[in-house]
Structure formats: C-alpha cells, structure tokens
Amino acid sequence: MVEVRGLHYAWPGSGHDTLAIDELVIPPGRTLFLHGESGCGKSTLLALLAGVLVAQRGTVSLLGQDWAALAPAARDARRADHVGVIFQQFNLLPYLSVLDNVLLPCRFSRSRAARCDGGPAAAARALLARVALPEPLWRRRADALSVGQQQRVAAARALIGAPELVLADEPTSALDAARRDDFMDLLLGACRDAGSTLVFVSHDERLAARFDERLALPAINHAAAA
C-alpha cells in the first residue's frame, strides 16, 4: 500500500532534514500506530504519505505510484480517490451542514462516490448513524456542533467511499477516555470492514495494543539523531 524509500525532507529555510528514512513499507489492510515526541516529524510524514508534501529526495509511493512524479493537480485527484484524512483540528467547512461535509470526498472523487453502497447520500447517512450522531444534527452547520460531535463528522468524512488509505493525526486528543474508546472501536471497525490501511498518529501509547503494528518514528528517522 505505502512504500517509503530513501526519503529526505527538509522544511524550507530549516537548513537540515526533518525526515530521513531509509525504508518504510505498510502492507494493504494493516493498522499502524505511529508515535514519537512532539516535533519529531509525525505530521510531516503523514503529509508526505498523503502527497500534500513531496520528498526532496527518495520516493514516497501509494499503490505503486510515487507522489513526486505527479503534477500538483494529479496529486490532488489521486489523494481524493484513495486517501481519507482525519485532521487533528478536524478541518470541517464550518458553513456547510454535517451531511455536506461528509459528502465532500465524493464530490471530488467519482471513484469514491462509485464505491458507496446505495449512493453517496445513503453512505453518508449510514456512516453518521454508525458514529452515533443523532439525525436531527445532520442538517446543522458543522460549527454548531461540540468538539466530540465534530470529531465524529470528521471520521465519517474520511471513511466515506472506502479509501484504501486512512491517515489519522491525533484524532482522540480532545476526547475523554470513554469517548476515545468508542471512537477507536468505530475507526478500527470501519477500516477493517472496508479493507483500508490505517496510519494513526498519537501520543497516547495506551492505544498501541489495538493496532497490528507499533512504530516509534525516531527509531527509523535518521534526521532525529543528526
């Protein structure tokens, strides 16, 4: 699913690599718990895996395609087709309804829309029901919801259309223990049902046992020791 080979990435003006990774391979359908101290490059790596950033040296490939070999518009289209992202700050569009936020990936990707059983609208409603968001909230603006409710909407948006790769950046940081556990049940179950590969970034190492693999980013990032 994901292959990283000889990766070097430095933020402009930094003068040194943020990430220097010889190899990282994530097979299809696996779940990976990625951890490390703040500032070690976890969010940067997710952005590279999603093709939001591109490697300055080496390759970062999704389904055999190196992101850096694509033009920006082609990267955007490929991301929409194959990647679902749960951002730490959720990044919902505040002026859209809950339902319209969940449907956004299908508006940008015909392949995601085609993978929705019964059509995108039915799939969005099914996901919102699965994340236990009450139906009366579905027509509300996203910014009218609580933090916990917005997080569930963000998860439904990432999961719609069964993307092959789901990336989650500290998605449980604002949740109490009970809501965190409920969210993890939902996320892992939905990825398992869809056959999606999941890369999950978190400081909460209590969650690591629920994943197929656990990886400390500093253990493979040579830049961290430079």
Image: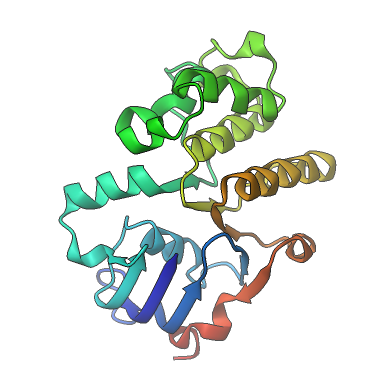
Q: Residue at coordinates 61% horizontally, 35% vertically from top-left?
A: 151
Give the color scheme: rainbow, by chain, secondary structure or one colour.
Answer: rainbow
Q: Quadrant of the N terminus?
A: bottom left
Residue 153 appears in which quarter of the rendering? Answer: top right
Q: Residue furthest bottom?
A: 226
Residue 149 position within the rendered picture, expressed as x and y whole percent measured from the top left: 65, 27
Asked if 183 appears above or below 39 in the picture, the reply is above
Q: Quadrant of the C terminus?
A: bottom left
Q: Residue at coordinates 28% horizontally, 71% vertically from top-left?
A: 55
Answer yes or no: is residue 89 visible: yes
Asked if 36 appears above or below 197 in the picture, the reply is below
Counting labels gives 0
Residue 176 position within the rendered picture, expressed as x and y whole percent measured from the top left: 79, 42
For this rendering, which residue is in front, 163 or 71? 163
In the image, taking residue 37 as reference, residue 5 lies left or right, namely left
In the image, taking residue 159 as reference, residue 210 lies left or right, namely right
Residue 53 appears in which quarter of the rendering? Answer: bottom left
Q: Residue furthest left?
A: 71
In the image, taking residue 127 as reference, residue 112 lies left or right, namely left
Residue 147 position within the rendered picture, expressed as x and y whole percent measured from the top left: 64, 31
Answer yes or no: is residue 10 visible: no
Q: Residue at coordinates 18% horizontally, 59% vertically from top-left?
A: 70
Residue 137 appears in which quarter of the rendering? Answer: top right
Q: Residue furthest right?
A: 178
Q: Residue at coordinates 37% horizontally, 63% vertically from top-left?
A: 62
Residue 156 position within the rendered picture, expressed as x and y whole percent measured from the top left: 56, 33
Asked if 21 appears above or below 41 in the picture, the reply is below
